[in-house]
Amino acid sequence: MKKTLLFLLIIISNFYFSQGDCVSALGVCGNSTITYSPTGIGNTNESLGDCLSTGEHNSIWYKFKIATSGTLTFVINPSDPTVDYDWAVYGPNTSCGSLGFPIRCNAATVIGVNPDTGLDMTSTITSAAGGSSTPYCKYMDVVAGETYFLYLDNFQGGASTNVSPFTLTWGGTATLASPFTDPAILQFPLVPPGSPAANPSDPKEVLICINPAVFNFNVLTPGILNGNSNFVVSYHYTQNDAISGANPITTQITVNTSTVYYYSVHYQDPTNPTNPINYCRETGKFKFKLGSISAYDGNLEVCANPTNPNVATFNLDLANVTTQPAAVKTYYSTMAAAQAGTNPISPSNAYVSAPGVVYVKVADLAGCYTIVKITLKIVSQVYSTILKDKTICIDDRATLDAGPGFASYEWSTGATTQVVSGLPVGSYWVKLQTGNCFAIQKVNVLPYTQPIISSVDISFAKVVVNVSGGKAPYKYSMDNINWQDSNVFTKVKRGEHMVYVKDANQCHEVDIEITVPNIVNAITPNGDGYNDYIDYSALANKANLVFTVYNRYGNKMFEANKFNDYRWDGTSGNKKIGTGNYWFSITWTEPKRNNTPVNYSGWILVKNRD
């Protein structure tokens, strides 16, 4: 903000130019240069005394206060050398009602090449009457706290008939008081309203949303004052009004982008309402500029949640709806809420929703806004269509292929390729990337179900192997000599044998050890020591061994166990049975593999002779 007060020509009217009277003297802001062109005499043609005997012509009054003691000089320089300025200083500490005679007064006629006048350090006079040729009076010794009035008059009469602005420059060692240079009063810099215009020499620009617009200037005041207390801001249509504080704009008005508006800042001493620095003003100007908020519809995509793919958590702040960095965005679930400014979505960075639309009010710092929509999309997880569970033999290794088309692959094994090999039986997963989304797909390498030798039936030299599970057809081998398609083996010698089975998957065969017992077809239990009993105690090491004898009607006649040493002597209930054929069954469990049950059956002739 300018520290120099630029005073321009003021339109002639008693109100506008009341500063032409002592009682409405303008305050001087420090040692700043003053430029002004007085016209008229204000409301009162005042009695000035001493050298100013011809009365007022085109006058202006100033009031100033001394900040630091010292010498005080000034130079009044008319812009037109044919103009004659007279002046007088009153004080110290006087009032308009009792000014008294001026302590310095100069009405010298100094028109021509050097029309300057004022106070300097070389003059010894304190007053110069009209018509004299001594334009300067002696400097003043001033003391801090003193107040003075300075009267200037653009004299018109005789050889001087022109009216022209003057420039007043202060000098000497003393300084004049100003609230705008006192850090104890103005603690923070004043901030002109608006933003710089494209042309730096143009007034700053305040944004409005429409042109013309109804505007309340008071909204600018806090920004201008910037935290300073005891300062007052007023707003005006003209620079002259801003300088004098006249005709302030006190209500909201209709403004436009072509008119220049002015503001004026002055101090208001809370303890001394007549303090001369209260009349010191700093002014500035500004214009309005039509603000425009640029916004557009946006889209927001998030990845589906595998546990609940119908809803997702959206960070609405990530939606690209404007390029203006200072824009303020507020989100709403409906257009009606956005238009009314009610029920905003909060928090906006964790909005849980199904696919749909939300609305965002995009506003700039001037309050201009527009409403656009954000389409919410949930991106379904993309899985491989060719990656399937694979079944292998338990000792083999598998190769898994997740298929092409994914941005990246990450397997549970640590591999990052489309295809992984050498995988044993187990459970695996692969993380598949599509765009910014990832899907975790599980896959299993399963073992083939091996065939199970469910039971073995032995009848004399015939062995029947019963198989379940696995994949038919099966192949069978006795003692791993030859493989056959039939599950029946004949002419099997008694003793221990290994039975092997493999299925169509051609994995490792399963086996079981069987025992073909010694075949006894007849006993003669007469006590002669020959063939008196049938003895299967050789099978006593078999698990769950049971030896049972039945008659031809299926009635159980005898059951041998470990307590009778798995022998039968042709008795039932300790009584001899009749001669005849009987059926027997011997069952046990082979412990290897699946505890396969084995059934050995046959017949036996019992000859009981008394």
Image (tube, rainbow, N blue to C red):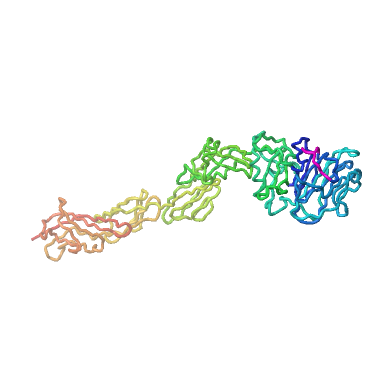
Residue 129 placement, left or right of 473: right
Q: Position of residue 27 (x, y in %)?
A: 75, 46
Q: Could you say which quadrant of the image residue 265 lies in?
A: top right
Q: Residue at x 14, y 56 (%)?
A: 557
User: Please, what is the dominant secondary structure of the magenta stretch?
Assistant: loop
Against 229, is 520 above or below? below
| Residue 197 visible, this orientation | no
- In the rendered image of this protein, does residue 257 appear above or below residue 503? above
Q: Is residue 258 left or right of residue 545?
A: right
Report if residue 115 lies within the magenta region: no
Which residues lie in the magenta part? 39-49
Q: Is residue 14 visible?
A: yes
The residue nearer to you, when weighing 595 against 370, is 370
Question: As drawn, which residue projects farthest toward the bottom?
Answer: 529
- Looking at the image, which is closer to me, 9 or 324? 9
x, y percentage for residue 293? Answer: 63, 39
Q: How many marks?
A: 0
Does 42 lie within the magenta span?
A: yes
Query: Quick check: 526 left or right of 486?
Result: left
Please name whichever residue, 66 or 554, is drawn nearer the observer in this view of the structure. Answer: 66
Image coordinates for residue 510, horizontal then vertical, percent: 35, 56
Question: In this image, 455 relative to 212: left or right?
Answer: left
Residue at 65% x, 44% y is 221
Measured as percent of width and height from the top left, residue 289 is found at 69, 38
Quadrant (top left, top right, bottom left, bottom right) of the C terminus: bottom left
Vertical side of 372 occupied by 31: above or below: below
User: Residue 14 lies in what quarter of the image?
Assistant: top right
Name the one closer to the observer, 422 or 559.
Answer: 422
